[in-house]
Amino acid sequence: MKYFIHLDSLSLCVFGVFFIDNWHIGEKCLAPLLEDGKLHEGTISSIEKDKNGKSFAVVSFLESEERKILITELCRVKTSRGPWKSLVFDDGDLEKPYFPDRNLPTPAVAFKLSDNGDFIPYTINRYLRDYQREGALFLYGHYANKRGCILGDDMGLGKTIQVISFLAAVLHKKGTREDIENNMPEFLRRTMKKESKCNPKKTFLIVAPLSVLYNWKDELDTWGYFKVSVLHGSRKDDDLSRIKQGKCEVALTTFEMLRLYLDEFNR
């Protein structure tokens, strides 16, 4: 256990998101790379047209730098849809966080923290300010080197979301339907023939004053699909059992409860 304090073929802008030929910013796609001619998965970071009216997408790849590619060369990423999928909602409706009254401030592109596949998902990164990305990168750097650290900043500048961004990266969260499927019980995933792509063996402990303990729970629920246990109150023994079985990703508790259960946490 780790301890750490569509539209038709028109170019339109709707609530700050551009749609061209049914592609939109932030959407995953398969695009060819000149190096090998093969299709690689990437994320569309911007869409534009040249003076001749041809549509291009700037595609961001994890394993390569951004490339400008003709829209007509892009392919859809095939996603398997479970039998439980609602016909009312599409994948975009299930993204977290979801702020319907806010325009998307930046393009929906993931923020890479390392070369081993840890990145802040685009669902969170598009709402972050530059200094918040730096804070998450600071936390990740110390975590990767097995060092403790203190993230000190003025009140109201988003230290909570910086921690949540870091947690989303190391737990390989996407903020999409994929997280919902990964959080399902194992027997349901077997029924759907799906393998979990998250990191279930990692559990992070957040110790906070009781006055803000459930605020942390609310923020985690707002910004992603985390499996959270609150070690406090009448169900604390059940929650401790879940934590010890590795059934939660984030455990929340108070300083007083930590002192009482310290030996249990260390086993």
Image (cartoon, rainbow, N blue to C red):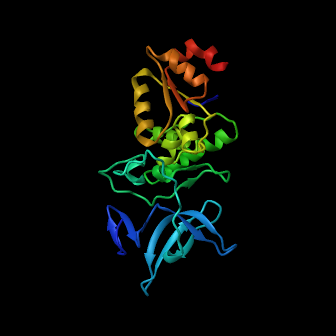
| Image quarter (top left, top right, bottom left or bottom right) of the C terminus | top right
Above or below 90: residue 206:
above
Residue at screen point 50% across, 33% down: 227
From this viewpoint, which residue is outermost toward the top?
260
In terms of depth relative to the viewer, which is nearer, 121 or 150?
A: 121
Where residue 65 sits, quadrant-wise, is bottom right
In terms of depth relative to the viewer, which is nearer, 122 or 79?
A: 79
Residue at screen point 38% across, 68% down: 19
Left or right relative to 25: residue 187? right
Above or below 201: residue 90:
below
Where residue 202 sits, quadrant-wise, is top right
Above or below 188: residue 20:
below
The image shows residue 197 at horizontal and vertical percentages of 60, 45
The image shows residue 38 at horizontal and vertical percentages of 65, 70
Residue 167 seen anywhere in this rendered image of the structure: no
From this viewpoint, which residue is outermost toward the bottom?
52
The image shows residue 85 at horizontal and vertical percentages of 42, 48
The image shows residue 223 at horizontal and vertical percentages of 44, 42
Residue at screen point 49% across, 37% down: 226
Where residue 219 sits, quadrant-wise, is top left
Residue 16 seen anywhere in this rendered image of the structure: yes
| Image quarter (top left, top right, bottom left or bottom right) of the N terminus | top right
Left or right relative to 89: residue 228? right
From this viewpoint, which residue is outermost toward the left?
101
Above or below 260: residue 127:
below
